[in-house]
Amino acid sequence: MEGECIVIKYFDKNGAEIKAGMLLRMSDGSIERVFDTTDNDGNSDLGISATNEDYLRRHPDARREYYSLMSICLRNVEVCNDRT
């Protein structure tokens, strides 16, 4: 329907719902923070940073870009509470 917003929910490998602000342990062991984002149509989405943190520190006017969780295989990803 016109004007209807699409809300997508994402779940980790254990069935836990992924929400903005959470930390995810990726399949390679790296830890990524989840951010509120929007897709190209303006719908709410979730994503992880696609921008190098060192670059952002050196270029304070640069904008962070995101990979949508839709583009990531979440089969081996899990919500974690810390960076260990």
Image (tube, rainbow, N blue to C red):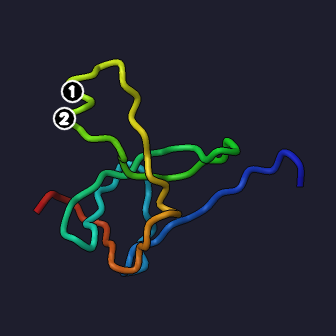
Distance, label 2 to label 1, CA atoms, is 5 Å
Dot 2 corresponds to which residue? 54
**Outermost residue to the left:** 84
Q: Quadrant of the C terminus?
A: bottom left
Mark 2 packing: few (<14 Cα in 10 Å), some, or many (20+)? few
**Outermost residue to the top:** 61
Q: 35 or 28: which is nearer to us?
A: 28
Identify whether 14 is placed above or below 53: below
**Callout 2 secondary element:** helix
Mark 1 packing: few (<14 Cα in 10 Å), some, or many (20+)? few
In the image, taking residue 2 as reference, residue 74 lies left or right, namely left
Please state the horizontal and vertical placement of residue 65, each as a whole percent of the image.
42, 40
Q: Residue at x 22, y 59 (%)?
A: 31
Q: Residue at x 31, y 67 (%)?
A: 79
**Callout 1 secondary element:** helix
Q: 72 or 31: which is nearer to us?
A: 72
Dot 1 corresponds to which residue? 57
Q: Which mark is residue 78?
A: none
Please state the horizontal and vertical placement of residue 15, each as a whole percent of the image.
43, 79
Question: For residue 16, what is the image quadrant?
Answer: bottom left
Amino acid type at mark 1: Arg
Please state the horizontal and vertical placement of residue 30, each as a whole percent of the image.
20, 62
Identify whether 31 is placed above or below 76: above
Q: Residue at x 49, y 55 (%)?
A: 68
Q: Quadrant of the N terminus?
A: bottom right
Please state the horizontal and vertical placement of residue 9, each as a whole percent of the image.
56, 64
Amino acid type at mark 2: Asp
Label 2 close to label 1 by CB (< 8 Å):
yes
Identify whether 23 is placed above or below 25: above
